[in-house]
Image (cartoon, helix red, strand yellow):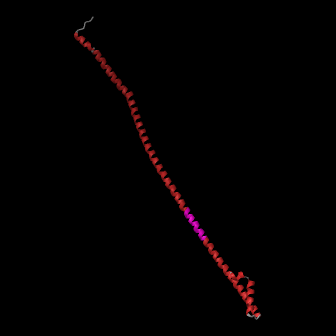
Amino acid sequence: MILLTAAETYDRMFGIDWQLLADSTLTIIAVFVLFAVMSYFLFNPARKMMADRQAKIKNELEDARTDMEEAERLREEYEAKLRDIDKEAEGILSDARRKALAGENQIIAEAKEEAARIMDRARVEADLEKKKLSDEVKTEIISVASLMAGKMVAVSMDAADQDRLIDETLKEMGEDTWLS
């Protein structure tokens, strides 16, 4: 058996020898190289994918915010249009009412003018009819006067005969002729 000295035991207590130190150093270098290679082939693409995904999410959030702002702007625009449509409809209705009232007033004015023309025509016709009747009455009076004159000349009459003759003539002509 091998007997170890106290110094050798002390070195061995921690179990460190040159071989172990070389193996540990080689392992650390291998791990570091492995980490560098893994970092290049695995971690960097994963980081790049995560950065791309983060940028994509950021862009999608920005697009969503922009879309929300656009939707809000469109909603406000449509609400304003709806308010304007109500105002425009009220304006159209008031224009239609105003035009209808103007049309009604025009129709009434035309009807009044037509009525005035008809009344004027009726007055003119009535005046013409009066003149015609007046001329007929004058003609009738002239014929009656000439008839009476002829009868008076033919007969010398006294006052009672003349009154009787005038009454007979008036009866022959009729009362309607003298009353109108």
Magenta region, residue range: 100-114
Residue furthest to the top: 1
Q: Is residue 149 visible?
A: no
In the image, 169 versus 66, the foreground residue is 169
Q: Is residue 39 at all visible to an observer of this figure?
A: yes
Q: Provide residue 40's location: percent of width, then percent of height.
A: 37, 28
In percent of width and height, residue 45 lies at 39, 30
Decide: is 176 above or below 29. Answer: below
From the image, which quarter does the N terminus lie in?
A: top left
Q: Residue furthest front?
A: 160
Q: Residue at x 71, y 82 (%)?
A: 177
* Residue 127 appears left or right of 46: right
Q: Considering depth in this image, is 55 or 99 the residue closer to the camera? A: 99
Residue occupying image coordinates x 24% and y 11%: 9
For residue 132, which quarter of the picture? bottom right
Is residue 123 a member of the stretch shown in magenta? no
Report the residue at 68% width, 82% height from top.
134
Q: What secondary structure do most residues of the magenta stretch adopt? A: helix
Q: Left or right of 58: which side holds 120? A: right
**Looking at the picture, how far across and down is residue 141, in whole percent?**
71, 86
Residue 105 among those drawn in magenta = yes
Relative to 153, say whether 114 is above or below.
above
Residue 64, percent across and down? 43, 40
Q: Nearer the viewer, residue 80 or 179?
A: 179
